[in-house]
Image: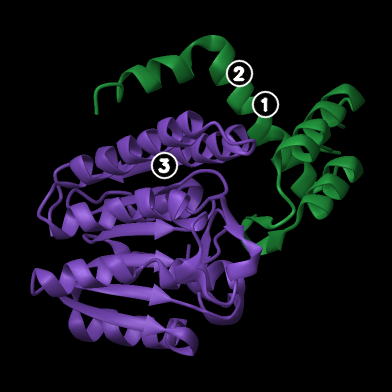
């Protein structure tokens, strides 16, 4: 297995486009550390491309951005990119971070069965975030979405920085709590709504598999 | 038949009141593959008590439970000095 990252960046609708835009800091951190990163952008975020690159490059770390269900993570146009019983074995031995709803429930558990090396960090509930609708075509100008997305970025960024999977998982969770603290201290009328969704993301983020995995 | 229980009206009312009072009109909530939803759409789903509505209610109740049980306070203390 080679030191490197494959990141999926589907962009076919607003929610996934936001995930792609806010993945920029993950890509920048990898570049800064001279770690190879293969971006599967837009329509290239599909099963065929993913399988081809994971087999060819054999990179150790995978970051999924996309909608999920218990047993699937999708890519472009909501088509499954990784699915239990189809190609989940491709994740064995690797470090996976899935910013996708529910994928830790079945997919995360299944792909880590009998795996002493790899790990899966993901969510057991829906990953939720608010956006400011006036910036939906320019997500990078949105001041609301990063409240939710930046803490989650810290998981892959910590791994890139050399932390273990457990450290990265805990740093991501801690950053989410700090975001809760910040929104509550801001005292705006939406503070509690934000805190509630951040709490949802905090409680549902889990680490399955090897706690000492490093990139 | 494994049908999910209906949400009590009082709970639905509580969640709707919260959304109405706290969610500015320019915000939308990303609810995974169901898309991004406006305040009005969220309220409609809670009223209908459909899959999305139930999930909105569930997130709300989980947060309230964490507040009531002390779990939330404990978590906040862990980042108090950071």
- Label 2: which residue? B65
Q: Position of residue B56 (x, y in %)?
A: 71, 41
Please determine whether, in this image, residue B68 is positioned above or below residue A1: above
* Distance between mark 1 and mark 2 Cα atoms: 6 Å
Query: Which image quadrant: the N terminus of chain A?
Result: bottom left
Percent coordinates x, y for residue A133 in the rendering: 65, 64
10 Å neighbourhood of mark 1: few (<14), some, or many (≥20)? some
Vertical comparison of B14 with A122: above or below: above
- For residue A50, which quarter of the picture? bottom left
Q: Residue under mark 1: which chain is it in?
A: B
Q: B28 and A135: which one is in front?
A: A135
In the figure, residue B43 lies in which quadrant?
Answer: top right
Q: Who's the residue at 44% across and 56% down the image?
A: A146
Q: Tag on residue A179?
A: none
Q: How many marks?
A: 3
The answer to whether residue B58 is visible is yes
Q: Which residue is mark 1?
A: B61
**x 13%, y 60%: residue:** A215
Residue to which mark 3 is pinned: A205
| SS of the residue under disc 3 | strand
In this rendered view, identify the residue nearer to me: A89 or A69: A69
The chain to which mark 2 is attached is: B
Asked if labels 2 and 1 touch by Cβ distance under 8 angstroms, the answer is yes
């Amino acid at each position: 297995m080679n030191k490197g990252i494959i990141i999926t960046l589907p962009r076919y609708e607003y929610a996934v486009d936001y995930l792609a835009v806010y993945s920029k800091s993950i890509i920048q951190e990898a570049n800064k550390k001279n770690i190879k990163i293969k971006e599967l952008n837009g329509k290239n975020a599909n099963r065929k491309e993913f399988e081809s690159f994971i087999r060819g490059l054999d990179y150790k770390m995978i970051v999924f951005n996309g909608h999920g269900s218990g047993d699937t993570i999708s890519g472009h146009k909501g088509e499954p990119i990784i699915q239990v019983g189809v190609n989940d074995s491709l994740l064995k031995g690797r470090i996976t971070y899935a910013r996708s709803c529910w994928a830790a429930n079945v997919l995360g558990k299944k792909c880590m069965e009998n795996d002493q090396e790899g790990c899966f960090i993901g969510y057991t509930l829906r990953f939720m975030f608010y956006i400011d609708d006036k910036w939906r075509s320019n997500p990078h100008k949105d001041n609301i979405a990063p409240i939710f997305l930046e803490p989650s970025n810290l998981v892959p960024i910590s791994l890139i920085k050399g932390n273990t999977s457990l450290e990265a998982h805990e740093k991501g969770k801690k950053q989410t709590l700090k975001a809760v603290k910040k929104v509550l201290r801001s005292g705006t009328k939406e503070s509690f709504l934000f805190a509630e969704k951040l709490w949802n993301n905090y409680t549902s983020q889990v680490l399955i598999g090897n706690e000492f995995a490093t990139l | 038949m494994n049908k999910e229980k209906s949400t009590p009206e009082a709970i639905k009312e509580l969640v709707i009141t919260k959304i109405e009072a706290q969610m500015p009109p320019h915000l939308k909530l990303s609810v995974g593959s169901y898309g991004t939803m406006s305040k009005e759409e969220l309220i409609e789903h809670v009223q209908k008590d459909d899959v999305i509505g139930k999930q909105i209610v569930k997130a709300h109740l989980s947060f309230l439970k964490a507040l009531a049980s002390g779990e939330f306070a404990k978590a906040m203390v862990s980042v108090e000095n950071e």
